Image (cartoon, helix red, strand yellow):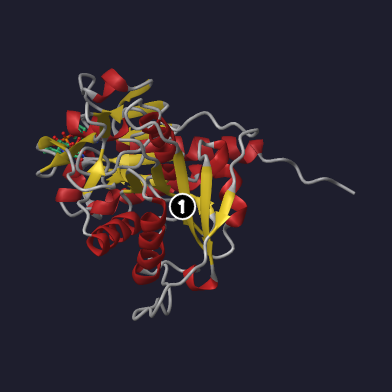
Amino acid sequence: MPGNVLVVAEHRDGHLKKVAFEMLGEGTRIAAKMELGGVVEAALLGSGVGGVADALAHYGAARVYLADDPSLGRYSSEGYTTVLAQLIQKTEPAVVLLGATPQGQDLAARVAARLGLGLASDCTAFEVAADGRLMITRPIYAGRAIATVIEKTIPQMLTVRPNVMVPLEPDPLRTAPVEKLAVETGDIRAKVIDLIQESGRQQVGLSEAEIIVSGGRGLKGPENFCLLEELADVLGAAVGASRAAVDAGWIDHSHQVGQTGKTVTPNLYIACGISGAAQHLAGMKTARYIVAINRDPDAPIFRVADYGIVGDLFEVVPILTAELKKALQQKRPVPQQW
Ligand SMILES: Cc1cc2nc3c(=O)[nH]c(=O)nc-3n(C[C@H](O)[C@H](O)[C@H](O)COP(=O)(O)OP(=O)(O)OC[C@H]3O[C@@H](n4cnc5c(N)ncnc54)[C@H](O)[C@@H]3O)c2cc1C
């Protein structure tokens, strides 16, 4: 069954999300399988976003469909659904991939309903079956079981969990034609009037963060997350948490790392008072460097940690914060004297 893989490239304010590159990499691998024999293409929707089309080509897109229109400046379920559904009908891909992000999940469900397609959400692995269809792996029942799904409808439509697939090495010499789409959003009944930034310090998104400071039951209570927030502020990091901390109501679920939370791949993951249960490791073990702070020398987290500090986090974290603050201030360039 020949066909192409269409990747919907999500961005925020013109910055592409990591998951877009990951889907292009996985899409390239899927499309290269003999049975599909197609290429990976990207759909880019927004206003004034054409500048990132080159990056999509560098990461594997053989063609970029660009829907660039002021009406798409802010994400709207209806407008984006209409444009993407029209594109799918026009290009007839075999597979459509969207990120399993809040926006991707919303858009995928609407487009699937509009076109009468099945939808597999939060997928973590793919194989190409003998008939050329994808066999899709996805966790179900809050991660207690893993399902293998083959969708009956074509195109096969899926959302892909961020930070699980591997992007291709970017090639700045790789280029792709950009096809501009005529945008007809039709009558949009709901529109975003205002965006309100959530209060609190979490400025860096967990899925995209290069450094994460994460806390578990060892923190003893919600009030102690401020210790991690201070360290995170010094490092420009995001704050993560174990499920035990989330289930205790100490921090919102959006911070949870692990099998039933977010999968993260930062350069540095600092685990404070987290034992290292398999379900937590499932979400962070591919971090480049893992630092564990735990008072139990036998805690399983030390088996995956690159650096381990056996000690009381209430003593260690403030010292670490103060020392890093000093070290990073010293590294700042001295202003030039005239
Ligand atoms: C289906 C399923 C899905 C799950 N999904 C997830 C998931 O997505 N994410 C997740 O995290 N878990 C998940 N879990 C739960 C997981 O099994 C563990 O229960 C959980 O990760 C434990 O969290 P924790 O490490 O914070 O707590 P604990 O296991 O209780 O560990 C607390 C650690 O803190 C240390 N400590 C205590 N006091 C201090 C101190 N003062 N200084 C330093 N160290 C200290 C202790 O030595 C201990 O190692 C899931 C479980 C199931 C069954």
Q: Could you tell me which residue is drawn at 33 percent across and 35 percent down?
A: 164
Left or right, 264 with reference to 56: left
Q: What residue is pinned by disc 1?
A: 43
Ligand 1 shown in quarter: top left
Q: Residue furthest right?
A: 338
Left or right, 175 with reference to 107: right
Quadrant housing the N terminus: top left
Some atom of ligand 1 lies within 8 Å of the CB belonging to the residue at label 1? no
Q: Nearer the viewer, residue 130 or 250?
A: 130
Quarter-wise, where is residue 133 in the image? Answer: top left
Answer yes or no: is residue 227 visible.
no
Left or right, 82 with reference to 283: right
Q: Nearer the viewer, residue 224 or 161?
A: 161
Left or right, 282 with reference to 104: left
Report the amino acid beneath label 1: Ala
How many callouts does the rendering have?
Answer: 1
Q: Secondary structure at mark 1?
A: strand
Residue 228, image x, y percentages: 36, 45
Quarter-wise, where is residue 313 in the image? Answer: top left
Answer yes or no: is residue 2 visible.
yes
Residue 166, image x, y percentages: 40, 31
Residue 204, image x, y percentages: 44, 51
Residue 18, image x, y percentages: 45, 43
The crowding category of the residue bearing disc 1, from other C-alpha atoms within 10 Å (few below 14, some 14 to 19, many at least 20), is many
